[in-house]
Amino acid sequence: MMRRLTALTAAMLGGCVSFPDAPAPTAPPTLAANVVQSIDGALLGLKRWPADDPIAVVIAVHGMNDYSNAFAGAGAWWAGNARVTTYAVDQRGFGASPGFGLWFGAETMKADLRAAIEAVRRAHPQTPLYVLGHSMGAATVIAAEKDETLGADGLILAAPGVWGGDALPLSHRIAANFAAAVAPAKTLTGERAGRQATDNIDILRGMAADPLVIKETRVDAVLGVVRLMGEAYDGAGEVCADALVLIGQKDEIIPKKVMEKTAGRLCGEVDMRRYPDGWHLLMRDLQAERVWRDVAAWIAGREPAKTSATKQDPQTALNAGE
């Protein structure tokens, strides 16, 4: 009886907090120098690292409170050493995109992702395209793919943010719903959690000084990301896409067992890589280059020969960085 009452309480509180639906389409998705235009004309922040004669294009989506700069090291390395062009998008409410610090809802985030994919596809119609999500970004990717295929040639899920839904204790969900219903604009810093995101202290210092990294998170945004992660976790079994899943064994943000269970539920061809020295910020840890190389090799190994340069063993394309 107590469990039923608790579940009913969570449902009632959840009904008190809602987020917007996806915006109505009024504009075609397009790319510009440092923005991508979404379906409603909103201009989302964009960083790009172009490669000469790319064998693949990656659209990268950042984690909670972060932005496109999360992929600066990886994007530059892939462009210079693996002939992979990277476009990193600021999700709405983050980085240089509109509504800094606000939560626009999962439906809007998924619509923005599809807009970015459409715009990049138009710019690279003949080039294989991969979608990479880190943490919350991976939740956005999984949730969108669950609704309808993104049409990507593969998904790359780094430290996937899937600690929600049935994976998250009910008490946590109740607390998030209650807090967002009572004081949605109240902000939290997360300092009391005492969790470390990476062993790269220079990166942590840089993020602390970066005005485009959110330092104080609204309570309703906390609820929003919990719901998005729950949608990703609960819907993972409906995702039938080839995927590379990257998990740091020292991750203190998302439980490893939850990430592994999610990877096991994906119904496509899944390659799961575990990194003994990897933390949550896998793309920026001290051992990040190992992750960059694995991503590049996975992409290169999936591509048919298009030029004499790509007919060699996948690892050959990485030799320039050694």
Image (tube, helix red, strand yellow):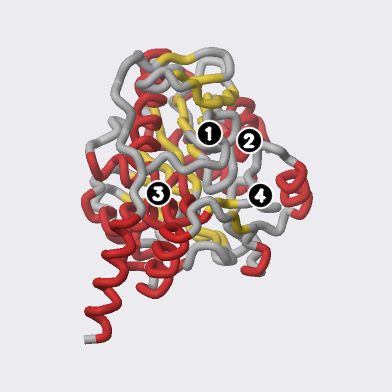
Mark 4 or 1: the one toward you? 1
What residue is pinned by disc 4? Answer: 215
Q: Secondary structure at mark 1?
A: loop
Which comes sooner in the sequence, label 3 or label 4? 3
Q: Secondary structure at mark 4?
A: loop
What residue is pinned by disc 1? Answer: 99
Relative to residue 80, is residue 166 depicted above or below?
Answer: below
Residue 245 drawn at (x, y percent): 42, 52
User: What residue sits 66% from the left and 57% below the top?
Assistant: 198
Locate the C terminus and report the quarter of the image it occupies: top right
User: What residue sits 32% from the left and 33% below the top?
Assistant: 22
Q: Are marks 1 and 2 in contact (CB under 8 Å)?
A: no
Q: Secondary structure at mark 3?
A: helix
Mark 1 or 2: the one toward you? 1
Residue 306 seen by the camera:
no
Q: Are marks 4 and 1 in contact (CB under 8 Å)?
A: no
Q: Are marks 3 and 4 in contact (CB under 8 Å)?
A: no
- What is the CA distance from the residue labelled 4 to the residue labelled 2? 15 Å
The amino acid type, in three-letter code, at marker 2 is Asn
Q: Secondary structure at mark 2?
A: helix
